[in-house]
Amino acid sequence: MDSNSDHHERCEAWGLDSSRIPKHVAIIMDGNGRWAKERGESRVFGHINGIDSVRLSVESALELGVKHLTLYAFSTENWNRPKEEVDALMDLLVDTLVKEVSELSNKGVRLRTIGDTAALPDSCQAQLKKAAESTSHQNQLELILALSYSSKWEMVEAVKSIIASGRKAEDVTAEVIADHLTTKDVPDPELMIRTSGEHRISNFLLWQMAYTEFHFSSVLWPDFGKEEFIGAIRDYQNRERRFGGVLDTNHNVQTK
Ligand code: IPE
Ligand code: IPE
Ligand code: MG
């Protein structure tokens, strides 16, 4: 990785403050179907073209020094889509992992998943396991794929495991709940991006995004490139985060 001053200069060239790059960015990658429809193609064509945007987002995150990038790739509710589309998405996932994992590893990317991955086809589970193992020592960027994920699924699992641990009701705190979520070792995202002009969360990281800044882009996912990613970070840097408090003259949240 480059030196601090290279990083600082690069951020400045993009109009960004290198000291305020979010550590964790989460993205709802939406609009593949509409992108394909505009071209008279099948929805799967849109998903295939969405892979380039994944690559560009990973590259942008690496260049900016983002440490965790969570991509919502397949929701619990997405299982309700036509079988051909679901099958194509699963195949695409396996093919992409096989093709890209060594490149990701070379760039310092560690791959992991959140979600009910036991519901995925065996071939996907095997490739995901392999990819996670072969990149486990990388530490530039953690790429978290949300697969067969939904926040309500995750919360139900958390409640079950808290009950199974035999904890008393009075010992359940916000920290205990956070510790039973699939993201337990990841800081909450400071920024969430959703593409395609939809303004909803669609069951994504509900607990973790209690104080996250949202950036909604009208661009469809296959058209979301480096400039759009950097634009979202710039938008984030213009926000005033208060966490329910008030700001002092230095724009820091005042404490008692
Ligand atoms: C996002 O694009 C990809 C997945 C949900 C897997 P969509 O497939 O939801 O595309 P639109 O929203 O129908 O355009
Ligand atoms: C959210 O997109 C899920 C993913 C991007 C994986 P959807 O397209 O499934 O969400 P809705 O149906 O528009 O809310
Ligand atoms: Mg959609």
Image: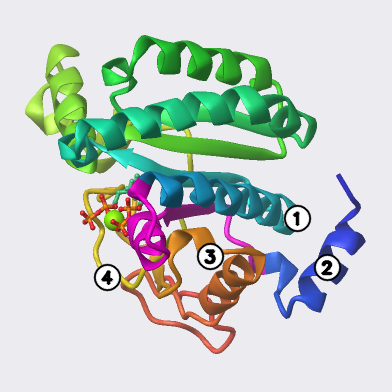
Does dot 1 land on a helix, a strand or a loop? Answer: helix
Q: Residue at x 66, y 31 (%)?
A: 100
Viewer-proximal residue among 196 and 237? 196
Where does the image place residue 3, in percent across and percent down from the top left? 91, 53
Q: Which residues are magenta?
A: 20-43
Mark 4 Cα-neighbour bin, 10 Å: few <14, some 14–19, many ≥20? few
Does the magenta-highlighted stretch encompass residue 252?
A: no
Inter-mark Cα distance, 2 to 1: 8 Å
Q: Position of residue 120 (x, y in %)?
A: 32, 20
Count neighbours of disc 2 (C-alpha within 10 A) and say few if under 14, some if 14 to 19, many if 20 or more.
some
Q: In the image, 215: left or right of 235?
A: left
Marks 2/3: CA–CA distance: 23 Å
Locate residue 230: give its quadrant. bottom right
Q: Which residue is mark 4?
A: 199
Question: Earlier along the polypeptide chain: callout 3 or callout 4?
Answer: 4
For disc 1, the marked residue is 63
Labels 3 and 1: the sequence-earlier one: 1
The Cα–Cα distance between marks 3 and 1, rounded to whole angstroms, is 20 Å
Q: Are marks 2 and 1 in contact (CB under 8 Å)?
A: yes
Viewer can see residue 183: no
Q: Is residue 235 above or below residue 35?
A: below
Left or right of 145: which side holds 11?
right
Q: Residue at x 29, y 37 (%)?
A: 85
Tag 3 secondary structure: helix
Q: Secondary structure at mark 2?
A: helix
* Res 74 seen here: yes
